[in-house]
Amino acid sequence: MKNFAADVTREVNFDGLVGPTHNYSGLAHGNMASARHQGLVANPREAALQGLAKMKTLHDAGFAQAVLPPHARPDIGALAALGFTGTPAEMLAAAAAADPSLVRAVSSAAAMWTANAATVTPSADAPDGRLHFTPANLQSSFHRALEAPTTAAALRAIFADEQHFVHHPALPSTPAFGDEGAANHTRLCSAYDAAGVHLFVYGQAGFPSADDLAPTHFRARQTREASQAVARQHGLAAEQCVFAQQNPAAIDAGVFHNDVIAVGNGPVLFYHEAAFADEVGTLGALAEKLLAHYTALCPVRIDHADVSLESAVNSYLFNSQLLSRADGQMELVVPGECEIDLAVCQTLQSVVTDPDNPIAAYRVLDVKQSMQNGGGPACLRLRVVMSAAQRAAIGARVMLDESLYDDLCVWVNTHYRERLAIDDLADPALIYETREALEALTRLLELGPIYDFHYAARI
Ligand code: SUG
């Protein structure tokens, strides 16, 4: 394959490294796969190796690939905040006796889905010419609300150079400002170094009025007010943004983030007809704002007749990565589950053979351990558009290459269990196993002290 020149602005995909406590606790709201697989015995080692194999495959295919670290779980600091005392092992035992749900929540490895880690604005769009980050508060569930502080610390450690990078605080952690990060944000543009248009998709209003639409079965996780606040933090003007409501019926059918039903890249928006509450208005606004940058929107719409909403949710067809190749074409990276559904396979064939869009190929990757918790290829990565100078300013060893891949595989094989049932989460040995693993990882990735246990002797 043709290679990118070293000095071009590129999209770097930061995949979450699956943590050692990966498990199936059925914690996620509105997420069908998580509910369906509750209680399954997980294989954290296989999960982490599947994630690494995905990263390596995309790196080898010429895409820019990086990694974000897992969080320290069980989160003993969270137990301390809930009033548990004693040694970490005593706190875990007391929490297990008081309410096993607490142990499940503080043990979740959900930080692997880095599409929910933050919202990112590339420097080409920011008034100060720097790259902007807002960690997501993920306030809609306890197990995910624990992520924001470590996410912020990891992003600050990796993107430390203030000349290039700006870090904003997570939004207030309350339902009116529910924010789930880049899973509900898509930047469309003609080229990565050119100015773009930001599509923020929200589930419902945070301060609703009587005529506002909202899902009836599942709570929406992202609010309009949260999306607007992130855009404000990043200095985005009205003409750079489209705020569109997700179709409430899609949320009720299991589309808990917009990235379960749409993915965009460059000027292309690949989406299901049920994605937006107002499809015509959303596409019209995007097309108009992109045209101001002399760019034509390229919508790739999939109809109900071709792929039902149920198939979209089960296959995660739209939770694919849409990647730009050096030859100017694009490629879709889809999960193995797409191959099980004939209608989805036929749709993929027709998309890649359609001369009216630049999607020339699709690639199938196996991330089954993550998929069983509702996390497909796109959930596992945070997109950061970076110039060559910004890539050179990264302050840790997180860009994937042969040697980092090899080191991470050895690290996983050394520290991870192959079997983790829900009842195992109360095992105090897990506390020390995971800390040892993360100590080693901190050195390997040259991260510096980002975890609570680095600071607080008590925990
Ligand atoms: O928040 N699952 C995650 C999956 C996130 C997927 N991300 C994107 N679509 N971008 C969630 O629903 C399951 C954890 C458990 O059940 O143990 C979980 O949190």
Image (cartoon, rainbow, N blue to C red):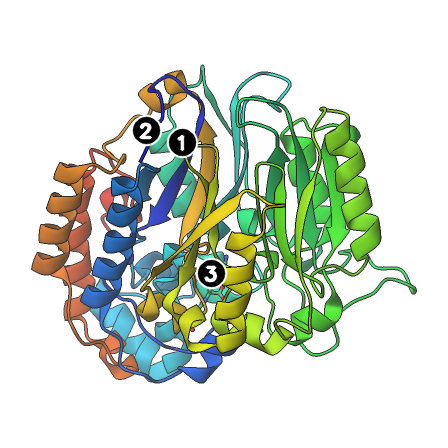
Amino acid beneath label 2: Asn
- Residue appearing at x 48%, y 47% in the figure: 360
For the residues bearing labels 1 and 2, Cβ distance under 8 angstroms: yes
**SS for dot 3:** helix
Tell me where residue 249 sits by quadrant: bottom right
317 relative to 265, above or below: below
**SS for dot 1:** loop
- Residue appearing at x 61%, y 72% in the figure: 307
Q: How many marks?
A: 3
Amino acid beneath label 3: Arg
Tell me where residue 446 sits by quadrant: top left
Which residue, given by chain and number where applicable, does mark 3 sit on?
144
Measure how far apart labels 3 and 2 are at the Cα level: 38 Å
N-terminal label among 1 and 3: 3
- Residue appearing at x 7%, y 58% in the figure: 414
Closer mark to the observer between disc 1 and disc 3? 1
